[in-house]
Amino acid sequence: MNGMMELLLPAFAACLILTGIHCYLGIHIVSRGVIFVDLALAQVAALGSTVALLAGYELHSTEAYLIALGFTFVGAGLFALGRVRDESVPQEAIIGIVYAVSSAAAILVLDRAPHGEEAIKDMLVGSILFVTWPQIIKVSAIYLAVGVLHFLLRKKFLLVSMNPKLAQQNGLWIRFWDFIFYITFGFVVTSSVRMAGVLLVFSYLVVPAVCAMFFVKGVMQRLLIGWGLGFIASVAGLYASAKWDLPTGASVVTVFGVILAVCAAVKFASGFAAANYNKS
């Protein structure tokens, strides 16, 4: 039992730091209505990693990380340019195209890379169970730097995400602030995907934010609910993984799905009850 706890402790710590940064960024992403930007940027980062793998670098090497980060910066620029005034093409369409093309290109590259199938699985579901303390410390430092920057510039970031028209009226250059946001987001996503995989990162980003938005409107209230739900999903997912010998990342993602279903049911039930009460 003690051995299992020692094995799960780094994974639990990793889940907690994922919860901390991704719940906050998720509020921005859901408010912007670009739900799949995380998947798209993660796939762009994955494409960079596959190119590094084909070039002869290890998938989790520093060189592969830097190449993936470079690809992510390109994706950030595309998404920032895709948000224009009086959009004739929705930004979500651009995000979808980037995701599809990056996925296809990654498959083509991995077809020529050694151990390509293993690399695909690693990028999708990650290997959070085998994360090490040095990895956690490095990623935590990156998240802390991003968190401090967002705290210092929180009014501008929140205004651009929540009310872009008002931000434009106040003289903010939307594309510039979008680019800065996606650059910082790219740092987080690239680091997170290396540690936890695309699916788990997407779940931490979107599910807590969506669940919180069912019930409250304030940013701080949403953060508190999101952090709480992320904590519950992490504990329950890791417990299920240990008890029934299940893949850790997939277990946590599945728990997130259950939490989302429960929150949606509660929201529907409360709305139905309120409607009947008003009628009476």
Image: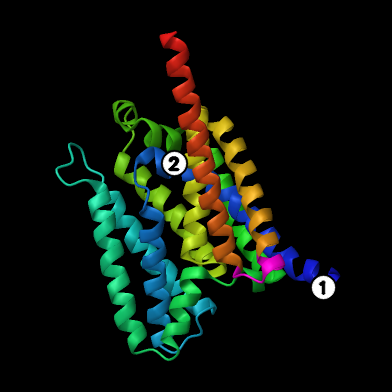
Secondary structure, mark 1, is: helix
Color encoding of the figure: rainbow
Position of 182 with respect to 196 (left or right) is: left
Quadrant where the C terminus lies?
top left
- Image quadrant where residue 111 sits: bottom left
Question: Residue flagged by tag 1: what amino acid is it?
Answer: Gly
- As drawn, the label of residue 92 is none
Q: Can residue 157 be seen in this view?
A: yes
For the residues labelled 2 and 1, the Cα–Cα distance comes to 39 Å
Question: Residue flagged by tag 2: what amino acid is it?
Answer: His
Query: Dot 1 corresponds to which residue?
Result: 3
Query: Dot 2 corresponds to which residue?
Result: 28
- Image quadrant where residue 31 sits: top left
Give the crowd class for mark 2: few <14, some 14-19, many >=20 residues within 10 Å: many
Give the crowd class for mark 1: few <14, some 14-19, many >=20 residues within 10 Å: few
Read off the magenta span. 241-247
Q: Is residue 65 visible?
A: no
Secondary structure, mark 2, is: helix
Position of 59 with respect to 245 (left or right) is: left
Question: 114 or 81, which lies in front?
Answer: 114
Q: Residue furthest right?
A: 2
**From the viewer's perspective, is residue 271 above or below residue 196?**
above
